[in-house]
Image (cartoon, rainbow, N blue to C red):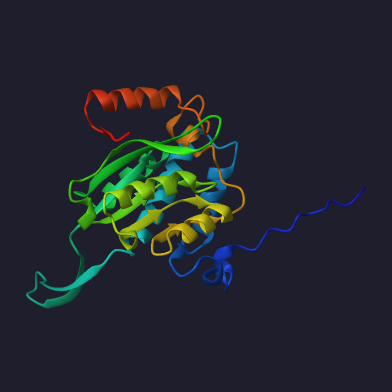
Amino acid sequence: MGSTEVTPVPKRLSESNDINDIYGPNLKILPCNNQVKELQTILRDKNTTRSDFKFYADRLIRLVIEESLNQLPFSKCVVTTPTGAKYNGLKYQKGNCGVSIVRSGEAMEQGLRDCCRSIRIGKILVESDADTHEAKVVYAKFPDDISERKVLLMYPIMSTGNTVIKAIAVLKEHNVLEENIILSNLFCTPIAAKSLVTAFPQMKILTSEIHSIAPNHFGQKYFGCSRFIVGETTNEQEKDIGRMRHERYLDVIV
């Protein structure tokens, strides 16, 4: 019998000492342990059922959101315990909000609400031209005072970074400072990471993994869409857009 050739597993960038040299200090990768690696494996496995996919995706989302919140500013405070003792603690500074990039970014909204019960969440819808693949913003709705807030921008999968770059440009058009944006992401390719840190060096990025292959089936599997193709709008997306138009939930900006 012939021997079976085993392809070596590439070294994870989170384990490399030169990640800051490649992407700068504002890109951070979720600390990897066996739990995180198992979640990433399940989400990449083509045999994972949709119910399992959503369950484990929500777990990874929660971990990424929790770590993203660590990037927000805190202030010191003193509270009194039930025994009357004083405790020196911390609290979030006011003025934070979330923004999800429709549609896959909406998968991360509940994870943010689970951590911040009353946080306000805006939305951006970016579509890609079927022929040119150029991203364009179709809708956007933000809190009126978003320029004064720290923004957690949520988008789970980044292959090229074009969609996120367009969304950030819209935030900056609404006078959001680049250093006030924290991008929460699950899976990112090296190309997307490099594009984003080059275009927006002051923005903070938090991802669970940088890998050359992104699980682009995420939106299709999580939401149960029959198809989810870059450059096209799914039937489910069209229904969502119609519903949001009807409810006047989003403002047309084009």
Horizontal side of 16 relative to 4 (left or right) equals left
Position in image of residue 14 (x %, y %): 54, 65
Of the pair 239 and 112, the residue shown nearer to us: 239
The image quarter containing residue 94 is: bottom left
Residue lying at the far right in this picture: please name it.
1
Image-based side of 17 in relation to 186, left or right: right
In the image, 176 versus 80, the foreground residue is 176
| Residue for point 27% across, 47% down | 113
Left or right: 70 in relation to 222? left
| Residue at image location 57% in from the left, 44% down from the top | 44
Quarter of the image with the C terminus in it: top left
Position in image of residue 223 (x %, y %): 43, 32
At 11% from the left edge and 72% from the top edge, which residue is drawn?
79
Question: Quick one: which residue is furthest to the left in this view?
Answer: 84
Q: Is 237 drawn above or below residue 57 in the view shown?
A: above
Percent coordinates x, y for residue 191 in the rendering: 57, 53
Which x, y percent locates residue 101? Answer: 37, 42
Q: How many marks?
A: 0
